[in-house]
Amino acid sequence: METERLRILVADDHSVMRNGIIKSIMETFPNAEFGEAANASEIMHQINTSKWNLAILDISMPGRNGMEVLKDIKESNSETKVIMFSMYPEDQFAIRALKAGASAYLNKDVTAKELGMAIQKIINGGTYITASVAELMTIELRYDHDKPIHEILSDREHQVFLLIASGKSVSVIGEELSLSVKTISVYRSNILAKMNLKNNSEITHYAFKNNLVE
């Protein structure tokens, strides 16, 4: 693929972060063309109206999160490859993202050099797996028969679960995810039912016990 034809869509609800990602990518691909999006609606508009070689998606965005958007992109028959870019540690979302069709899962503290390496491998048809993600995949294959119960949660339930475990209230979570308190309460009820837990304290205890939050 010719570098000058590389088109990358950068999606994050913070303009400073988008600018930082673009600047990092330009160190390896100075002739790349960039598009920007701040939410799911803008992302899918760009995907449906233009051709992109790669989309870099943040997981935490207002409304539909990056995991949901990833699935939308794959269901749209778009040939766009996707890198999930997140502040969350690999053990929280990496395996989920790769199973959903992402070509890489990278933390936001990744160096410009590694980001460039990941993009190069992906546009050449590969999947970029960091050493820590490879280790997680090995562990999952080895112990899949003893999968922890939180793995049965949907992606959005998993996100709400982590936010509750970190001590945030339903109203604060609703504001952070741009969802109503009622909707977050429904997710909370689903989490408690699926995991056979009784309250937020048990959610927090489970999360700490399984090293899902610090």
Image: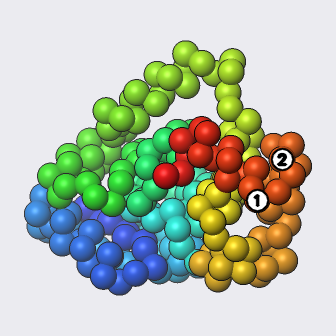
Observer-nearest residue: 177 or 23?
Answer: 177
Mark seen at residue 173: none
Residue 146 sits in quarter: top right
User: Which residue is located at x 60 percent, y 78 percent?
Assistant: 176
Residue 147 sits in quarter: top right
Residue 128 in view (yes/no): yes
Please tell me how many numbered marks the rendered image carries: 2
- Which percent across, then down, holds residue 47? 50, 69
User: Which residue is located at x 74 percent, y 40 percent?
Assistant: 152
Q: How is the image coloured?
A: rainbow
Q: Is residue 55 left or right of residue 200?
A: left
Q: Is the residue marked by circle 2 packed among few (<14), some (14-19), or many (20+) residues within 10 Å? A: some
- Which percent across, then down, holds residue 15? 35, 83
Residue 87 sits in quarter: bottom left
The amino acid sitting under disc 2 is: Leu
Residue under label 1, please give it. Answer: 200
Q: Secondary structure at mark 2?
A: loop
The amino acid sitting under disc 1 is: Asn
Residue under label 2, please give it. Answer: 197
User: Which residue is located at x 27 percent, y 69 percent?
Assistant: 21
Disc 1/disc 2 C-alpha distance (Å): 8 Å
**In the rendered image, the vertical position of residue 143 relative to residue 113, given as above or below:** above
User: Which residue is located at x 84 percent, y 77 percent?
Assistant: 182
**In the rendered image, the vertical position of residue 99 relative to residue 180, given as above or below:** above
Verify CB contact (< 8 Å) between mark 1 and mark 2: no
Observer-nearest residue: 30 or 182?
Answer: 182
